[in-house]
Amino acid sequence: MKNSKTTNQDNSDGKQNDLEFNKSSAQNEFLTTNQGVKINDDNNSLKSGERGPSLLEDFILREKITHFDHERIPERIVHARGSGAHGYFELYKTMEKYTKAGFLNDTSIKTPVFVRFSTVAGSRGSTDLARDVRGFAVKFYTQEGVFDLVGNNIPVFFIQDAMKFPDLIHAVKPEPHNEIPQAASAHDTFWDFISLMPESMHMIMWVMSDRAIPRSLRMMEGFGVHTFRFVNEKNESHFVKFHWKPKLGTHGVAWDEAQKISGKNPDFHKQDLWETIEAGNFPEWELGVQIIPESDEHKFDFDLLDPTKLVPEELVPVTIIGKMVLNKNPDNFFAETEQIAFHPGHIVPGIDFTNDPLLQGRLFSYTDTQLSRLGSPNFHEIPINRTIAPMHNNQRDGHMRQEIAVGKVSYHPNSLGGGCPFQAKMDQGGFVSFNERVDAHKVRARSKSFSDHFSQAKLFYSSQTPVEQDHIASALSFELGKVEAISVRERMLGLLNQVDANLAATVGKNLGIPVPKDIEKPINHGVGADDKGTQELSKANQNIIHSDALSMLKNPTLSNTIATRQIAFLCTEGVSANSVKAMKTALQNAGAKAIIIAPHLGTIVSEEGTEISVDQTYKIAASVLFDGVFIPAGKGIADLSKIKEVKEFLNDSYHHCKFIAAEGEGTQIIKSNSDIKDNDPGVLLSDTRSDNNLSVSFIKALGKHRFWEREKTL
Ligand code: HDD
């Protein structure tokens, strides 16, 4: 029977309890075997004599080693590297006009969620800072069943048809003959494939932008990518695109910085997410929807079913409908983050699919992959995957079945079981697919309405600020510079030329090859066999040549908060405690964190004679792990010039366009560094100690994240 969706039940507790049931703690307990037999000696195997051979009968040794031998499960084929967290979703306003999904109707319902962020290409142990798309998968444990929104931090995808997915992934993964490179797209096979797939050009623009090297998982947008449907009680359908907007704004790092972070701390994103949640700074995203009436399906000059296209926010605004808060770290990475199984096919009444051919292929793939990864069709019984809605059906058995189904009836229809479990009618919450009319020939083809591969790539590129455009050109120069096959580089230049001639010329110059005059014809993917509806497409977005929402720096929802930012304080013995305290307090009041760095751990003695606790030493700290840097005043601060890591720290901060502040004697460290221009607007200096004006302007500057304009002067 359907749960009443109007009850004000705190589902987050419901889920917690469900998971609690499976928790185990060994506190104050004896060590036992898996069968519950208490173990007397866990240090020595059973032997024939102290120096004799081990005995086969040692069931304790065999159980322990056998279990250990099987501790690993296959990692995900893609998105193997991930970080997860628990939280909840709250609705701001009812969406019942569009969807009957209970969790999107009732603002009093708090829906528990688990989110898993990931990179795509790397193995499970690979670096967080690879240039890559980030997975953004959200499992909603709704009262009407599990809804998974399995999206990315980029609103479009490389390919239009699931048929090409294995090819795309084979191309981007390490090359099969030598397993090189790990977690990187900068190699021949990836660009060979891309250069033959013009449909990927829009996505390529995004992946070569700073979106693909986020500052934090907490500072990324999320997108459902495909067009889905909302279906209401009257069985009316609207198309819908899902967006997650981060409260902390959308920010990236510099590419050189990303590469250095990968060495200094490959777990940078994972640790950042974990630590901020532990500190109670819960990350938040607002859920937005773009809603398009059925009657507008053919209104655009692109096809809503084409996953390489987005709907510009200028054409259809994003309506914010709720927020998600991540407020609890997993207790056990494997049990939760690793064993969670997402699936775009996990939907609830009120949400439905469209005929996007990429989505349609995904609907097959995700259950199939869990069978080999988690090993059984019973993966829904793993605690993290369990629905909180009542679950009854006639499925039985299989590997590792947890449920003990009682009774002899496991079929429908039946009379011996009283006809149970019953089918639910639509008004009882039964899922009924939207009755879309489909009248077509069976063909293996692609609609003509999918064939414009460049307009939105151009839209994206032209919507970027000059700094962002430079970053795209640099990223392409880096990636294609690592490609050995000249023919692949040339083909890519031909494609880039169709996006923007200047972009192609810049990249071509860096690669030392001219942009080819004869553009190679795109590969024909069988376009056109079923172009029904194509003629009806109007040119609704032709006038849109800029969309601020596509630029991270112009995005109107850009947040200027410095909450949770990490600011390095470069200190040494004799630093002014007052100077440190004044800036630290100002930053903390703005939500940021001051990290005291000094030559040794423990405490240092300040100029005023007080002790200051040290957080990190210069051996551990690196500029790339911080958002900004402050050099306080103090008679002893001149000693910083004797520490070689300090110079490297400051130069990296400067090159990565971070804001640098210094006061009193601290300004001398900057002024004596010939690599730093002290008239740079992003370098804030004050001769006054504990300068309130300095802290105000530093906080304002940090809110801009980076002083990217500096790049031109480097
Ligand atoms: Fe996928 C995992 C997102 C296309 C097949 N995908 C996976 C995850 C995310 C996405 C976020 C990780 C979920 C987690 O954290 O466990 N995938 C996407 C998006 C796509 C997309 C946004 C395009 C719009 N994927 C796609 C296609 C196919 C797959 C076209 C196959 C036809 N994806 C998979 C998979 C994975 C997966 C192989 C690996 C692990 C898993 O499913 O559970 O089945």
Image (spheres, rainbow, N blue to C red):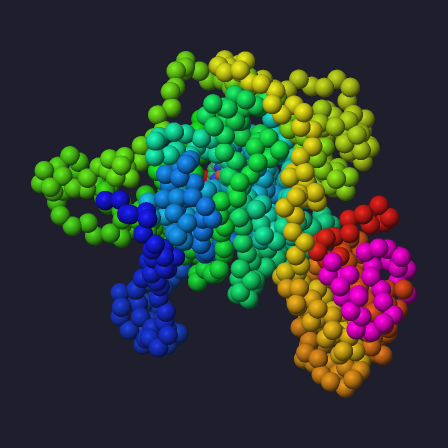
Position of 147 compared to 580: left or right? Answer: left
In the foreground, 208 or 388: 388
Query: Residue placed at 17% from the left, 36% from the top?
Result: 412
Image x and y of residue 513, in percent:
80, 29
**Residue 50 falls inside the magenta stretch:** no
Position of 585 compared to 121: left or right? Answer: right
Query: Residue placed at 50% from the left, 23% from the top?
Result: 297
In the foreground, 128 or 420: 420
Position of 400 compared to 209: left or right? Answer: left
Callout count: 0
In the foreground, 487 or 406: 406
Query: Residue placed at 80% from the left, 82% from the top?
Result: 607
Image x and y of residue 364, in percent:
40, 33
Image x and y of residue 301, in percent:
59, 22
* Residue 284 in sight: yes
Q: Is residue 301 above or below residue 689?
A: above
Res. 696 image quadrant? bottom right
Position of 360 compared to 448: left or right? Answer: left
**Residue 697 falls inside the magenta stretch:** yes
* Residue 376 in sight: no
Q: Is residue 378 above or below residue 460?
A: below
Report the residue that reaches farthest toward the bottom.
609
Res. 35 image quadrant? bottom left
Range covered by the magenta-colored residues: 672-700
Image x and y of residue 222, in percent:
55, 44
Q: Is residue 172 above or below residue 456?
A: below
Q: Quadrant of the N terminus?
A: top left
Query: Residue placed at 39% from the left, 15% from the top?
Result: 439
